[in-house]
Image (spheres, rainbow, N blue to C red):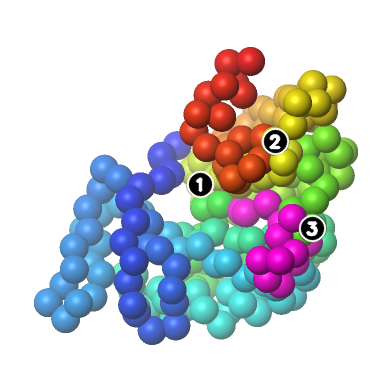
Amino acid sequence: ASECGGSERRTNGPNWDAAVIWHREKGMRIGPAGEVQITHGLITRGLDIRAADSWLDVRAGIAGTAPALKAEISPQAPLGIYLRLSAFAARQLAQPSEMASFRDYLSSTGLYVVGIDTRAFGARRGRADKDAAYRPDWTDPERLDYSDRAARVMAQLAPGTRTGTVVTIPGLLAASNDLKAAEQVVFNLLRHVATLLGIERRTGCQIVLALNPEPGGLIGNAGDAVRFFHQ
C-alpha cells in the first residue's frame, strides 16, 4: 500500500484554491510557464464542498471542479481527490447503482478517491454552525455507524490495493474530564477498528482512520493525541 501525506504548496490556478498535496518522498517542480509538473508520485486535491448534504450535490461539485483541475495540474497522470461526505451523502453513495455510476465516472475522467472527510455529520454552511454540523460525537452510535459506512464506501473506491483514509472528529468536540464519556469514545473507536480490520481481511484494502485535532476538543493538538493514546 502506498503512503498518503506530504507537503503543501498553495497555488493560484484558475477554479481552485485548495492545497496541492504530493507524496513527501516523490518529486514535482514548477514549469517555465508557472505550471505544476509532477515528475513522479501522487498528487491529490481536497474537495471541500461544505454546504453539500446530498450525494447529488457532492457529485455536481466534483463534476464542476475536478476535471478542470486535472487538466490544469495533472493532464497526463490520474488525479486523486478527497471527498467530504455527510452521513446522508454516504448512505446515498453506498447504494450499488450510485457506487457503480461513480466508479465509472472516476475511471472515465482519470480521477480516483484517496480519502473521505467525515467530520461533518451534516452540511456545513458557515463557521458559526461548525459544532452543530460535527455532532454527534464518538460517544454516539450514530457516529460509529456513519464512520463504518464511510469506510466501506472508501474500500469500494480505493484504486487497487492503495490505502484509503477516512478523516473524523477528535472523539469529543470539547475537552472533558468526564471519564465515562472518554471511555465510550474509546469503546466506539475500537469497534470501528474492528470494522476496518474486517474490511482489510475481505478486500485487501487498508482503510486508515485519521482523528483530526480540533482546538478545544478532546484531541486539540499533537500533545493531546500522544496523551490520549498513552492513557
Q: Gap between marks 3 and 1, in whole Å?
A: 36 Å
Q: Is residue 204 above or below residue 150?
A: above
Q: Residue at x 52, y 79 (%)?
A: 65
Dot 3: within a 10 Å radius of its alpha carbon, few (fewer than 14), some, or many (20 or more) residues?
few
Residue 161 located left or right of residue 179: left
Q: 177 or 168, which lies in front?
A: 177
Does residue 115 appear anywhere in the picture? yes
Q: Quadrant of residue 36?
A: bottom left
Residue at 64 percent of width and 42 percent of height: 216
Image quadrant in which you'd find residue 79:
bottom left
Q: Secondary structure at mark 2?
A: loop
Badge 2 density bin: few <14, some 14–19, many ≥20, Cα 10 Å: some
Numbered disc 1: secondary structure? loop
The amino acid type found where label 2 is placed reads Ala
Task: Evaluate whether residue 211 shows in this view.
Answer: no
Are the residues tagged 3 and 1 within 8 Å (C-beta)?
A: no
Give the x, y percent position of residue 187: 79, 24
Q: Position of residue 210 (x, y in %)?
A: 58, 40
Three-letter code, disc 3? Ala
- Answer with left or right where residue 143 lies relative to residue 25: right
The circle drawn on residue 132 is: 3
Q: What are the residue bounds of the magenta stretch?
A: 116-131
> Could you tell whether 171 is left or right of 63 in the image?
right
Q: Disc 2 designates what residue?
A: 175
Question: Of label 1 and label 2, which has the lower sequence position?
Answer: 1
Task: Judge whether residue 27 is colored magenta.
Answer: no
Judge depth for marks 1 and 2 and give the one in front. Answer: 2
For badge 1, the amino acid type reads Gly
Residue that label 1 marks:
160
Q: Nearer the viewer, mark 3 or mark 1?
A: 3
Query: In the rendered image, which quarter contains the N terminus?
Result: top left
